[in-house]
Amino acid sequence: MDFDIKKIRNDFQILSQQVYGKPLVYFDNAATTQKPQCVIDKITEFYQKYNANVHRGVHFMSAKCTEANENARNIVKNFINANHSHEIIFTHGTTESINLVASSFGDRFITKDDEIIISELEHHSNIVPWQLLCERKQAKIKVLPFNDKGELIIENLETLISKKTKLITLNHVSNSLGTINPIKKIIELAHSHNIPVFIDGAQGVQHQEVDVKELDCDFYAFSGHKIFAPTGTGVLYGKEKWLEQMPPYQGGGDMIDIVTFENTTYNELPFKFEAGTPNYVGNIAFGKALEYVNSIGIENIAKHEKELLDYGTKKISQIENLTIYGNAKNKTSVISFLINGIHPYDAGMILDKLGIAVRTGHHCTQPVMDHFNIPGTVRASFAFYNTTEEIDILYEGLLKVVKMFNS
Amino acid sequence: MTIKNRQQEIIEEFEIYDDWMDKYSYLIELSKDLPIINDDAKKDENLINGCQSKVWLHADFDDGKIYFTADSDAIITKGIIALLVRVLSNSTPQEIIDADLHFINEIGLKENLSPTRSNGLLSMVKQMKLYAIAYKTKNLPCL
């Protein structure tokens, strides 16, 4: 289909509003994305017409919600090309997916002195759960570094791997620098040593096609809210062979088979990992969001975002003393930068008053900021509904920032 | 001049700006008036938590009054501290403890700063009041 930006923007009513009397320029998409009308309508529809708890009721509405929830699971399965829909676990988001694996995989497979390799590019949520696990198990973390362009030095991986390495975990795409990591290559290398790989795909799925079968990753996690679905939704994809062997993460309703006070047996996959009432309306809307992405076409999205990245990089590089952090060859539509001598918060505050929403700070990646020895950056992250005209507004805004602080 | 009068003075200064950019420009100007903390006091224990930008605060006690010095790596934050220091410095511990800092609301700073930034502002005020409590306790006559 044709990529009709005007039509697309009409699907996102929020984008046409004004803030402080200025047209909103929303460039904080790596933090969360906006929701198309069809997703919002889906939530309303289910609460207005069908709301009933899933997997429990014998009545019409419960069956309707259960069917829609499981249909959403199937949409996710197809979206990432998993083998089975029971390999798709619904979670509250990437963070919960990581914690689930750190807890359940960790309990089953990690013992004293084992090693987990983590990349230096990670978000805190793909560091801290593993640190907690390592504290519990007296295991160790090893770090795969990146170079000054923001690319992982994968030649170092071979030397980091030892007989004690039990897992390699890294993101598909860096949230603070936009680097697309060569995960297929890393997975191949890891598998040649029989080491499973966990991929934090929070910044990955919304920008490019993800095929977990082709990647052969053992786990892939992502959040709904970063791919146009409601907040509080997320996915953990895990290979059946791992999920089968892992103990449950949380106990509660729906995850059991038979409960007695002496012994409890657990439900089959995926329900073993979905204790309690799930966010079924969120999951259903999540499915709708993925259908919406499919209707636009992920290749079309990637193409438009690449144009925005190239245009934006060229445009804001014209500003004197501006440094872009993250210049990897393969990048998503994220530009992280600093203007010499201007604190990112000062820049962010002024841009905010001009109606431009960017993220400032360390972006939950303090080790990345430490690498560059900076307190943080200003991060503009584009989605497919953004335009080059909006980048021009950012450029003009930055000129104002420079004028205000350097005069 | 009392804390109340100093607040009134600031409110009047800000009244002439209806545009937010002008208010920020004025804050940037004010940042230059901040009595800067000595380098040897610019250490981690004087860093204030809750600020996304770094803020150092120090207090001296002289002749019954507290004098603040501070610094920040962000200019707008520095401007806000300059205002707080201007209002609270040169006051007795009791005056600082009792101070109701209504000017922050009235010049529209609280609403217009992001929640995290706003928290930083509150931490700053809290820390200044803690200094006042500490000096008040220290200054109690021995019974």
Image (tube, rainbow, N blue to C red):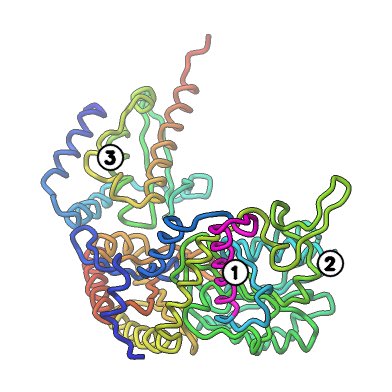
Residue A115 at what x, y percent from top left?
A: 78, 71
Residue holding disc 2:
A113
Q: Residue farthest to the top?
A: B143
Residue A241 at what x, y percent from top left?
A: 78, 76
Residue A202 at what x, y percent from top left?
A: 54, 72
Q: CA distance from mark 3 to mark 1?
A: 52 Å
Residue holding disc 3:
B104
Front position among marks 3 and 1: 1
Task: Name the element at disc 3.
Answer: helix
Quadrant in the picture for residue B133 = top left
Q: Residue under mark 2: which chain is it in?
A: A
Residue A70's disc is 1
Task: Name the element at disc 2.
Answer: loop
Q: Amino acid at mark 3?
A: Ile
Quadrant in the picture for residue A59 = bottom right
Q: CA distance from mark 3 to mark 2?
A: 54 Å
Q: Is residue A71 visible?
A: yes
Asked if residue B64 lies in the magenta stretch, the reply is: no
Quadrant in the picture for residue A278 = bottom right
Residue B9's disc is none
Type of secondary structure dominating the magenta stretch: helix
Q: Earlier in the sequence, mark 2 or mark 1?
A: 1
State whether discs 3 and 2 lie on one chain. no
Q: Is residue A378 visible?
A: no
Q: Nearer the viewer, residue A26 or A160?
A: A26
| Magenta segment | A54-77
Task: Name the element at disc 1.
Answer: helix
Q: Nearer the viewer, residue A70 or A109?
A: A70
Q: CA distance from mark 2 to mark 1?
A: 40 Å
Q: Amino acid at mark 1?
A: Glu
Q: Amino acid at mark 2?
A: Asp
Tell me which residue sits at (47%, 66%) in the image: A285
